Amino acid sequence: MDWRRWCAALFGVGLLWACPACQKVELPSGGEGQAVTEEGENLPDEPVELPDGYVDALSVGEVLRTYAGIDLEEDYEVGVVGYIVGCCTSTSIGSASFSTQEAKASNVLVADRKDETDAARCLPVELKKGTDVRAINLADHPENLGARVFLYGLVKTYFGQVGLKSVAYHEWVESGGETAPPEEELPEDTVTAPPDTTAVVGPTVPGSDEVADDTLDVRDSLVVIQGGRTLRPLK
């Protein structure tokens, strides 16, 4: 299932239902009055090759550079691919830990490199209790360290810097066998059912299998701004 269609469905029935027509977003020249650090602006523009099927997503470095200094009171959606490299153990990015010994279930850090240990190059991701994305945490699942994941949520200030919150969709990423999804061992007597190939991509018209005309498509309302980036504020 294409992640773009999943994201359209999830945000279509949740966050985006009240979104008016989007206007062109002007990037501010600085981050005056914002809690967001400007470290991302100084990160080198290192190209990151994303797996097939994720060409419309951003790398962690691209998210950090693009949103550094921007007023994140607005809601900007983003799809990002990165490796789970650690988590924050306290209330600031300075508490970043790149092991599972003191892992917290409330957040993870993702980066473009599996062996990253520089917090300035990491994107903190909020894992709200009771949400599906909570399953990627390192406290309960230390085997997730080093796994590659796709996340779709809102860019917000988190741990005092650019972060990701309200994650509506996530999936494990496989790239030529480089990173396989973590697997849980099942009891020997467990019977697994065949995968369900039916996917709901939006509200349907009553009495038919057609998708309703008002089903939102993420790609239809993206706004292209300077440098070829795409941002979309939610009102």
Image (cartoon, helix red, strand yellow):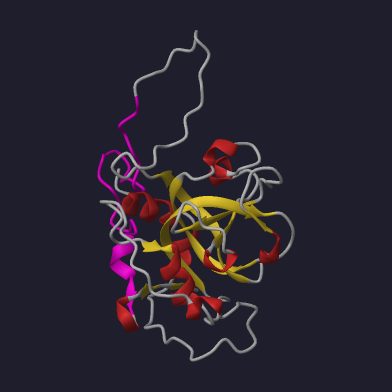
106 vs 69: above or below: above
Residue 96 forms part of the magenta stretch = no
Q: Quadrant of the N terminus?
A: top left
Q: Which residue is the extreme one toward the top? A: 189
The magenta span reads 195-224
* Number of numbered markers: 0
Q: Nearer the viewer, residue 47 or 135?
A: 47
Q: Is residue 72 above or below residue 151?
A: below
- Residue 26 picture quarter: bottom left
Q: Position of residue 182 (x, y in %)?
A: 47, 34
Q: Name the residue at 34% across, 50% down.
A: 3
- Prevalent SS, magenta region: loop
Measuring from the top left, give residue 207's x and y in whole percent: 29, 38
213 vs 104, nearest the viewer: 104
Lateral position of residue 46 relative to residue 91, left or right: left
Residue sitting farthest toward the right = 90
Looking at the image, which is closer to me, 220 or 65? 65
Vertical order, 209 against 168 (above or below): above
Give the percent coordinates (x, y) of residue 19: 44, 69
Taking depth in this image into account, of 154 and 113 the one nearest to the observer is: 113
Asked if 57 appears above or below 222 in the picture, the reply is above
**Residue 211 inside the magenta-drawn segment:** yes
Residue 16 in picture, x, y percent from top left? 45, 63
The residue located at (48%, 71%) in the rendering is 64
Q: Residue at x 51, y 57 (%)?
A: 116
Residue 12 sits in quarter = bottom left
- Residue at horizontal 64%, vertical 43%? 100
Is 200 positioned to the left or the right of 95 in the image? left
Classify residue 208 by image quadrant: top left
